[in-house]
């Protein structure tokens, strides 16, 4: 079933006459368009791609199979007018991404019923096809090459920002079009901050460093975390690294079709809690990745009772964070297969790496 066919099936189930897709990620996923400020109006038997004259040439090169409408009055007013002219009575809109001001513009130009439509495209995006997997794997390869570069070049006296900037440009040199998110380099006691963005702190000999990074390749992302030490760290950090590694492997062992997010989360907590560090692991154990850095399903929030299925690509990222000492997180990307999972990222070392450059 094609993406459009799957989306039309969702529309019929929700009793929508049409669906207006405005999230740029979803528009790109459905049409192949790589620009922005555009929308797709989908009915059971037709589709209209709405944009403006700035993208006229780009649309000809990237979009096929849809009628193209170049608006002159504004994207949302044009969409509302098109829906009304087509006799649409119930128009679905992407409630999770549309702002109130955009909703107001749409409502002003469309006199029928506007119906919130959450996660219609996002649910389809959760299962990756072979072409998507190839792009994710390439994004992972680029990120892992970046990590090898960091390990060879990082040393005491560098700032966290210098490490992050060097890594970001290195990945771009290998074909990345951007970053999955702002690269996290958290050293010393700052590594106890799970999302400690890079600062001008100077990395010291004996520091532990948590590096959380990823890149975008042709619209698809990677997301990896590795923890290592510069020189010889506090022995406590060697200990918690082994525990986090064991938790990471416990998650990888059970990941597969039919396993819920809650079961994944419990597998990590069983190891960490059993070692006496329950209170130092407070975030979700994983999330889906693809065109977005946080997709479904996963072991967090509303996905805790959702079962994994073949084609999901998810992170496996337990951690322990000790205030004033430091933290450890190990994050891998896993593909759910029919009989379990496939590790897409290279295995992390079983013991904390000590870097002496």
Image (spheres, grey):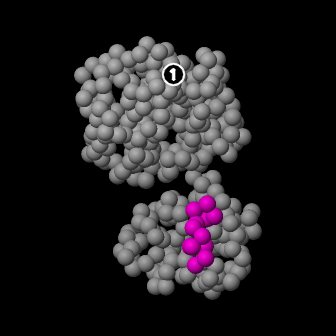
> Which residue sits at x=65%, y=43%?
301
In depth, the one of 205 and 256 nearer the eye is 205
In depth, the one of 224 and 163 nearer the eye is 163
Q: Number of numbered discs present?
A: 1
Q: Residues within 10 Å of mark 1 (few under 14, many from 20)?
A: many
> Which residue sits at x=34%, y=33%?
147
Residue 309 percent across, percent down from the top left: 64, 41
Q: Which residue is mark 1?
A: 245
> Which residue sits at x=63%, y=40%?
300
Residue 8 percent across, percent down from the top left: 66, 65
In the orientation shown, which residue stands out farthest toward the front? Answer: 324
In depth, the one of 293 and 45 nearer the eye is 293
Q: Indicate yes or no whether the magenta region holds residue 298.
A: no
Q: Is residue 111 above or below residue 130?
A: below
Q: Indicate yes or no whether the magenta region holds residue 104.
A: yes
Q: Quadrant of residue 248?
A: top right
Quarter of the figure that contains the N terminus: bottom right
Q: Is residue 176 above or below residue 99?
A: above
Residue 193 percent across, percent down from the top left: 48, 34
In the orientation shown, which residue stands out farthest toward the top? Answer: 235
Regarding residue 130, the answer to whether it shows in the image is: no
In the rendered view, does 110 fall on the left or right side of 134?
right
* Disc 1 secondary structure class: helix
Regarding residue 107, the answer to whether it shows in the image is: yes
Quarter of the figure that contains the C terminus: top left
> Which residue sits at x=34%, y=52%?
177
Q: Is residue 154 above or below residue 68?
A: above
Residue 9 percent across, percent down from the top left: 69, 62
Range covered by the magenta-colored residues: 94-105
């Amino acid at each position: 079933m094609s993406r459009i066919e799957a989306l039309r099936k969702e529309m019929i189930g929700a009793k929508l006459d049409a669906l207006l897709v405005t999230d740029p990620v979803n528009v790109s996923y459905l049409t192949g368009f790589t620009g922005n400020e555009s929308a797709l109006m989908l009915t059971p038997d037709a589709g209209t791609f709405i944009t403006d004259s700035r993208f006229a040439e780009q649309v000809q090169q990237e979009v096929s199979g849809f009628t193209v409408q170049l608006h002159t009055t504004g994207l949302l007013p044009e969409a509302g007018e098109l829906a009304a002219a087509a006799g649409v009575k119930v128009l679905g809109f992407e409630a999770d991404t549309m702002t109130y001001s955009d909703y107001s513009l749409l409502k002003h130009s469309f006199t029928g019923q506007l119906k919130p439509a959450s996660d219609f495209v996002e649910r389809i995006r959760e299962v990756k096809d072979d072409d998507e997997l190839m792009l994710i794997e390439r994004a992972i390869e680029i990120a892992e090459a970046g990590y090898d570069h960091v390990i060879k070049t990082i040393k005491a006296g560098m700032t966290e920002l210098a490490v992050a900037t060097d890594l970001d440009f290195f990945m771009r040199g290998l074909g990345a079009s951007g970053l999955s998110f702002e690269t996290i380099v958290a050293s010393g006691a700052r590594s106890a901050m799970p999302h400690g963005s890079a600062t001008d702190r100077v990395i010291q000999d004996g520091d532990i460093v948590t590096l959380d990074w990823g890149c975008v390749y042709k619209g698809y992302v990677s997301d990896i975390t590795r923890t290592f030490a510069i020189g010889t760290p506090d022995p406590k950090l060697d200990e918690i690294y082994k525990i986090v590694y064991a938790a990471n492997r416990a998650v990888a062992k059970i990941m597969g079709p039919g396993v819920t997010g809650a079961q994944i989360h419990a597998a990590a907590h069983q190891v960490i809690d059993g070692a006496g560090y329950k209170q130092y692991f407070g975030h979700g154990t994983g999330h889906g990745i693809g065109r977005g850095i946080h997709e479904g399903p996963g072991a967090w929030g509303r996905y805790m009772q959702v079962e994994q299925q073949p084609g999901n690509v998810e992170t496996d990222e337990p951690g322990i964070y000790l205030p004033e000492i430091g933290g450890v997180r190990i994050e891998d990307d896993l593909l759910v297969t029919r009989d379990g999972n496939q590790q897409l990222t290279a295995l992390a070392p079983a013991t904390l790496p000590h870097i002496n450059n």
